[in-house]
Amino acid sequence: MSWFSFSEIRKQNNLAVENTVGIYQNELEHRLSAITHFVQWTVVHDPILDAFTVQNHMGDYRKASNELRLRVSDMQYSTGNEYQYFFYWDEKDIFFNASEINVDYDTYKEIKEKIRSDVSFRTAPEGNFSWKPCIFKEKEFLYYTITYKHRTFACLVSMEDILSPLSSLNLGEYGAISAISETGEVFYKTKKGPAGIINSVYNRLYFPGSTSGLPFSLAIDSRVLGNYGKLFVLQVIVFLAALMLSFIMGGYILVSYKKVILPIKMFSKSLSEMDSVSDGDGLDLTDSKIQELNQINEQFKNLIHEITRLRIDIYEAELDKNKFLIHFLQQQIKPHFYLNCLTTVDSMVSLGDIDAAKKMLMFTSKYFRYLFQVDMNFVPLANELQHIEDYLSIQNMRLSRPTLFEADIPREFNELSVPPLLLITFVENSVKHAVPRDGDSLKVTLKCSMMNEDAVEITITDNGEGFPRDVLNKIKNGEDIVEDGNHIGITNCIKRLKLLYGDNFRLLADNVRPRGARISLRIPVRNEV
């Protein structure tokens, strides 16, 4: 209802302004039309101006000018003294005011120079004659002139006088009236007008000159409430009265809440905290306002104590289960590489390549030493990279095809904590399944970058044929990848990540162009092992 009333007040205020401006525009249009007709008829048909010919003398000119002033004085009686008239005869360069002057002498000289420069030497009254805005001594005027047979008759009126009938409008403290020329430029403004946040409580009305027959348009900034602000203030008083009544009612409700509802709420809250307390002694259901709770207080304490003990036992059992599962998944990765290494050493010894066998044994011992000593959930990233390099050194000696490894790891990431034997699983997958183009060596690239202050992304790519479509779908959907034992390491990695990070990790697998597979792993940042 307040918003509807506000809209109606705004509408009524705008309507009042529109009616006033409509009457003003109609009256002004008639006045300007009358002056226009007077100026045209005088310069073309009035015999008074026939005295301004080269055959006459100065006395004739003086007599004609006095008669012209009498004629203008009669015209001003109906149109107003604010309209000033000037006459100029270019053949003798005679210029004089045909009405009482309402401007200072400097402005008078500027008007004289303006009329002299605007003489068009027309021999007939035909032409596009209209009122034009002009400025003399930083003051805005409307200016109309017509030239016929070297005689120029002009009328001038200040914009301040033109808009003075609208001064009775209650536009507010920052309300303003702007006069806009036919080219769309604001050439006069009664005030600076509203700006900034004040503009939100002011309304702009536009009155085009084309519909009113005036040589300029009007833009009026008026206060939204205007003359009807008292009605809105009355509404505010009614609202405040209703608000006060609401506070009184709220006081009664508050008393009822404290006396009745709050004791019941405290009892419910105490019961709901049964799941959060660690000991029955931390729960207190007694309340001076509800004496019946004193009898069951001890029973609840004993019950909650027993529930807490059972919850701790279940939690410890679940923790042991998770640790066992993580250890099992780690051990599931280890055995498949043992026999291949030993077989390779045996072959080298049989062929008499003792140096190669020594190198193979050295890489293998380092590889197995790290493998058997890792019994933590997290290790430094630098240790994992060294383990990957040992693995690839073994593979390069076993396989005829060399594998190139490139690690783009900033120095500050060396102490970053990662799960052990995690990254090598993806490297092993590339070595086993990635087949580069003919003549190319297998290349594995590992990069590490910060996603934000809480997460890091590790990317492993190769230049092989990429993942098959079904394997990508299984990784995306979190399904087990078991194909005659292949890719089981990736399945174990996903299970380990879920146990270690819950849902705070992201593993993405895709293929890159022109060829190759890519694993992107995002995990939370841990700065300690």
Image (cartoon, rainbow, N blue to C red):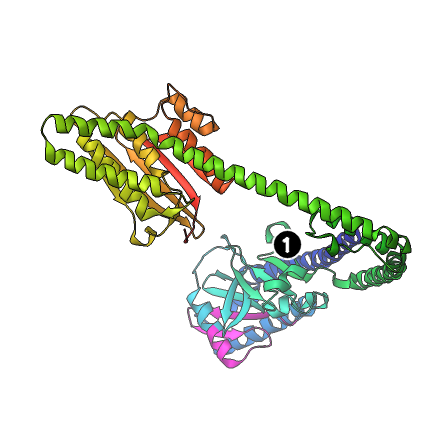
Task: For mark 1, give the secondary structure.
Answer: strand
Query: Mark 1 highlights which residue?
Result: 207
Q: Position of residue 15 (x, y in %)?
A: 74, 54
Q: Please report the residue visible at 36 percent of the width from the left and 38 percent of the height from the top.
A: 421
Answer with left or right where residue 94 lies relative to residue 302.
Answer: left
Which region shows up in magenta? 81-110
Residue 224 picture quarter: bottom right
Q: Residue furthest left?
A: 352
Give the x, y percent position of residue 106. Answer: 49, 79
Q: Amino acid at mark 1?
A: Phe
Q: Does the magenta segment cover residue 487?
A: no
Q: Is residue 22 visible?
A: yes
Is residue 26 or residue 487 the one in the foreground?
Answer: 487
Residue 306, above or below 84: above
- Residue 412 pos. (x, y %): 32, 54
Q: Nearer the viewer, residue 91 or 63?
A: 91
Q: Nearer the viewer, residue 162 or 330?
A: 330
Q: Is residue 136 left or right of residue 464?
A: right
Give the x, y percent position of residue 389.
24, 40
Outermost residue on the top side: it is 484
Q: Is residue 52 visible?
A: no
Above-or-below relation of 106 to 118 = below
